[in-house]
Image (cartoon, helix red, strand yellow):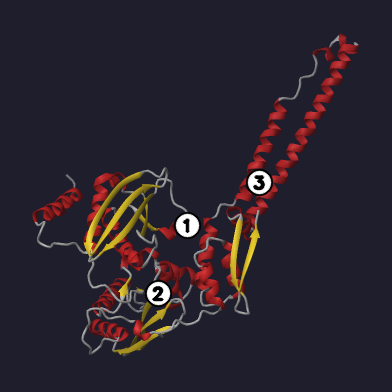
Amino acid sequence: MNKKSMRLMIISAICMMFPFTGFSLSMDEALKNVTLKLYERGLSNYDKVEMIIEVVNIHSNKFDRKARTIRASLFTSLQDIFPKAKIILKEEAISGVSSNAVLIKGTYQLEGSKSTIVLRAISQMNGQLLAKADETFSVKNKLKFENLVVVLPLEASQLNKSVTKTFSKIFRSALSDTKAFNLVSSDAIDSVNADEIQNQYKCTREECSTIVAEQLNAKLVITTQYNKIDDNLYFLTGSLKDVKTGRTVIEKAIQHDGKISTLKAELVKLACQLAETCDKPVLANPQIAHRQSPQAPQLDQEDQLWDLIKSSSIIEDFEDYLVRYPTGKYSTTAKWKLEKLKKSYTNWPSILSFVAAGAMAANYIAIGNNLPDEPECASTLESTTSACISKVNEYNGDKEEKEAKQGEAQTMVIVFGIAGFFLMDSDEEVDKQTNSFYHIKNINLYAETDNKLRLSYSMKW
């Protein structure tokens, strides 16, 4: 019996031993349990595949705030139970997955103080249901305001990576202790890889923060920096930023003496300052929305356009945005999404040109193999007879016709080959043609300068 089976048996035994004691699972415990059930019920043979996770409200079929929280915990559970599998969020699967990938589709349903989660493991190859499991957990301390907050790792160039990682965890724990923030799980943040995005776009942690936050469907992002001014003077700064509007909700700075032994206390202090809970009793369900304007700000033209295209899979949408707003508030995210879409497409015009060139080459060879043989009488005394002359004339005409077809095939090989190479090198045009190949009909909504919306319809072939 393996360890996973033993763990499942222990959990089941506890539930059977205490059926009426009011024992109830937390959300994290329930998701760990239901993931183990999937493993036992048929998913143990799929422990090295790509797993795409999706969670929705069973009634609305929407990816709401509760679904986001459940998915973040499910991400961690799947990593624990299937350490060799590659866990992928559904929106990340736009670039394509392998044929043997498995979709972990979850639905949740609230029932008073209880919530039931149902997970189905479905083969992406044939749609077959591989395993199904459900679990119920208690709903406690529901936040009145549930805006998701991404906490990015501490940025401190003068500290080594292991020390920086430790202090990042300390700061995140301190933020959690304030009970003011609905934090995205650290595992979900790691799956986006903020460092890789920052290195790729050569942007600061704060400039790249919107990309990370949007990938995790968060509304707010917290960034922290630890900077050296001189040998005895350091500053620890933190900011809470609204991802959609780009507005800094709150920003704090703390002077520090540069001693590692006192950095933990200053991080805890910074956390309570951002939460505005310093020297105040910690409430059961505090929230941070009171610092924001009670009336949502009116979206400007750039925000309207971004709301319309941010979930698009059409390359031209992001190219159009960058033409209109080359240094806009979402330009970094738009460039990242544009590059991701370009990597995901298949260059069909170039591929089809090379296929056509190959077909013409095969036709050229086939014609050559079927050229007629010269009549035997042409090399004998019968060459002057009318019957032989007729055969020779027929042979010459047939040979001339097939040689002409060979010439045409040879020309088409050259034409299609050059076209294939030309299309392969013309990235911009190929991107547009290929993307249009997938989106025959597009309906796009754009924000005009007079604050009115224009609906444009285009047919693309």
User: In the rendered structure, which amino acid carries the disc numbered 2?
Assistant: Lys
User: In the rendered structure, which amino acid carries the disc numbered 1?
Assistant: Ile
Name the disc covering residue 122, or none: none
Q: Considering only vertical position in the picture, is 455 above or below 92?
A: below
Determine whether the residue tagged by mark 3 lies in a helix, strand or loop: helix
Quickly name the residue at label 3.
353
Q: Considering only vertical position in the picture, is 211 above or below 5?
A: below
Image quadrant containing the N terminus? top left
Quickly name the residue at label 1.
94
Q: Say which of marks 2 and 3 sits in front.
A: 2
User: Which of disc 3 and disc 1 is earlier in sequence?
Assistant: 1
**Total count of labels:** 3
Q: Is residue 84 visible?
A: no
Q: Quick one: label 3, few (<14), some, or many (20+) residues within 10 Å?
A: many
In the image, 229 versus 173, the foreground residue is: 173
Q: Position of residue 148 (x, y in %)?
A: 35, 72
User: In the rendered structure, which amino acid carries the disc numbered 3?
Assistant: Ser
Quickly name the residue at label 2.
219
In the image, 199 versus 34, the foreground residue is: 34
Q: Say which of marks 1 and 3 sits in front.
A: 1
Q: Is residue 332 left or right of residue 3?
A: right
